[in-house]
Image (cartoon, helix red, strand yellow):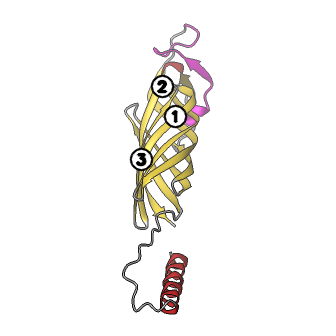
């Protein structure tokens, strides 16, 4: 921002000097468009799904008229990725009924990269794709976790969202789906620099 201010002041000084050299007494008006300035940003994100699943993550990017972003999300719990077996929707493993403790574990990972389009200075649209996984595991009576295949999904993550730039702050809201079977809403708050 300081560099933009210095460049603007230098341009105005040069304009004034050229006008004086041409014999002018005044410059009536000047319009300086600085909307092409790149906006690099970083946001801290919170994701929520009705699964229920909560996740946290970071997004980094840069956008002028067009730009890019990368995002990573995690559920911060990894027990559902460390399972000893898989079960069906009812909890049966290879047709055998299991005894469960009643505890569950959710795990979530998501990595997305995408493109941005900024039609106006304060708003950018986002569209991206990547890899995502969401696992639900049930704890057995002996303390092991069994992954429930019916409520777990891995595959292509698709992301669509909007980002608002408000001075040095930015806000975002995104919709993310994994293989169109698991979905979450992601809200971000961050800074532009």
In the depicted view, which residue is nearer to us: 84 or 149? 149
User: How far is mark 1 from mark 2, CA to CA?
Assistant: 8 Å
In the depicted view, which residue is nearer to us: 13 or 132? 13
Which residue is label 2 attached to?
Answer: 180
In the depicted view, which residue is nearer to us: 171 or 102? 171
- Residue 65: image x %, image y %? 51, 54
Disc 2 crowd, CA 10 A, few/some/many (<14, 14-19, 20+): few
Which residue is label 1 attached to?
Answer: 158
The stretch of residues the image draws in magenta is: 79-95
Is residue 140 visible in this depiction of the protein? Answer: no
- Residue 9: image x %, image y %? 49, 84
Q: Secondary structure at mark 2?
A: loop
User: Which badge, 2 or 3, comes first in the chain's sequence?
Assistant: 3
Which residue is label 3 attached to?
Answer: 162
User: How far is mark 2 from mark 3, CA to CA?
Assistant: 20 Å
- Are discs 1 and 2 less than 8 Å apart at CB? yes
């Amino acid at each position: 921002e300081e560099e933009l201010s210095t460049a603007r002041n230098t341009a105005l000084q040069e304009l004034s000097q050229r006008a004086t050299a041409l014999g002018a007494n005044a410059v009536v008006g000047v319009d300086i468009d600085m909307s092409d300035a790149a906006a690099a940003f970083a946001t801290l994100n919170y994701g929520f799904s009705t699964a229920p699943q909560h996740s946290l993550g970071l997004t980094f990017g840069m956008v002028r008229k067009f730009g890019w972003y990368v995002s990573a999300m995690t559920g911060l719990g990894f027990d559902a990725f460390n399972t000893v077996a898989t079960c069906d929707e009812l909890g049966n493993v290879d047709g055998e009924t299991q005894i469960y403790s009643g505890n569950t574990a959710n795990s979530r990972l998501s990595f997305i990269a995408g493109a941005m389009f900024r039609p106006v200075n304060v708003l950018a649209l986002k569209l991206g794709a990547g890899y995502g996984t969401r696992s639900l595991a049930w704890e057995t009576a002996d303390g092991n976790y069994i992954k429930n295949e019916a409520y777990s999904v891995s595959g292509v993550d698709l992301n669509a969202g909007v980002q608002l730039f408000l001075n040095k702050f930015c806000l975002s809201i995104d919709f993310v789906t994994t293989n169109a079977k698991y979905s979450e809403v992601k809200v971000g708050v961050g800074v532009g620099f």
